[in-house]
Amino acid sequence: MKRKKPKPLVAPPMRSMKRARKVTSAFHELTRQIEGAKEAGDRGTAKQAEAELEALGGRASYQEASVLTTSRHRTCKWVFSLLTKYGLRPGKGVPPLPVLEVGAVNGQLMSIPWLRHLQQGGHLFVMVPLRCLTHSPYTTWESFQRALELVGFQVKATKTSPKVAFLCAQAVEVPEPGPQLTAALAEFAHPPKVITPGAKNTNDFAICYG
């Protein structure tokens, strides 16, 4: 009798880009449902969404999917091209550039020898899902750029791919605290204000200054 192949104890590594995108979208949708249900005191809906999230593989599955999707679309290439364009890439014998990477799912930027952690000033590179700026009732390209300008950044370059929005800004000045700045920042107070209502705007991305 032919022996059966033993069943693995853990799920195989994620290799399908289609599945990775499905897991990523489902994770964000379920976490939004959980947060909304908890705020509303709906424990039943929260428990059901938590069970679906667990069946999906939880945060570990989401992180695995994120690693796969970013491995195919290396945003660091865009960062490097702009650093070179702006004459910021250090030459031989020059100290590495200060850099701080936030929210990364891989260490591509941190493996580059001519970069080190950011202190103050310099350039800000932002990569977010495109839907955050096109399908959110709270945020648009224009409002996102205004949010950066209010805290002292000047947008220098933008780019989009089918799934990702890219933005480069430079810290040009520190805003003077006072009534004028406080009034301007009120536009981005919590809870966020709806600026683009519509059934298609289901992404909850928002910028809030507290």
Image (cartoon, rainbow, N blue to C red):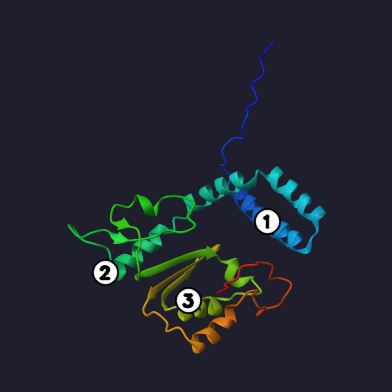
Q: Which mark is residue 108?
A: none
Q: Which mark is residue 31?
A: 1
Quadrant of the drawing holding the N terminus: top right
Q: Secondary structure at mark 3?
A: helix
Residue 60 drawn above or below residue 192: above
Using the numbered discs, state the Cα–Cα distance from disc 2 to disc 3 in whole angstroms: 23 Å
Residue found at the very far bottom of the displayed protein: 180
Residue 127, position in %: x, y? 49, 64
Q: Secondary structure at mark 2?
A: loop
- Callout 2 crowding tier (Cα within 10 Å): few <14, some 14–19, many ≥20: few
Using the numbered discs, state the Cα–Cα distance from disc 1 to disc 2 in whole angstroms: 41 Å
Residue 163 appears left or right of 28: left
Q: Which residue is mark 2?
A: 87
Residue found at the very far top of the displayed protein: 1
- The three-letter code of the residue at mark 2 reads Gly
Q: Earlier in the sequence, mark 1 or mark 2?
A: 1
Residue 194 appears left or right of 183: right
Residue closest to the eye, 198 or 40:
40
- Which quadrant holds residue 204? bottom right
x 32%, y 52%: residue: 112
- Callout 1 crowding tier (Cα within 10 Å): few <14, some 14–19, many ≥20: some
Residue 167 drawn above or below residue 103: below
Residue found at the very far front of the displayed protein: 178
Given contact means CB atoms under 8 Å apart, are the residues at marks 1 and 2 in contact? no
- The three-letter code of the residue at mark 3 reads Leu
Residue 123, position in %: x, y? 37, 69
Residue 55, position in %: x, y? 71, 43
Q: Earlier in the sequence, mark 2 or mark 3?
A: 2
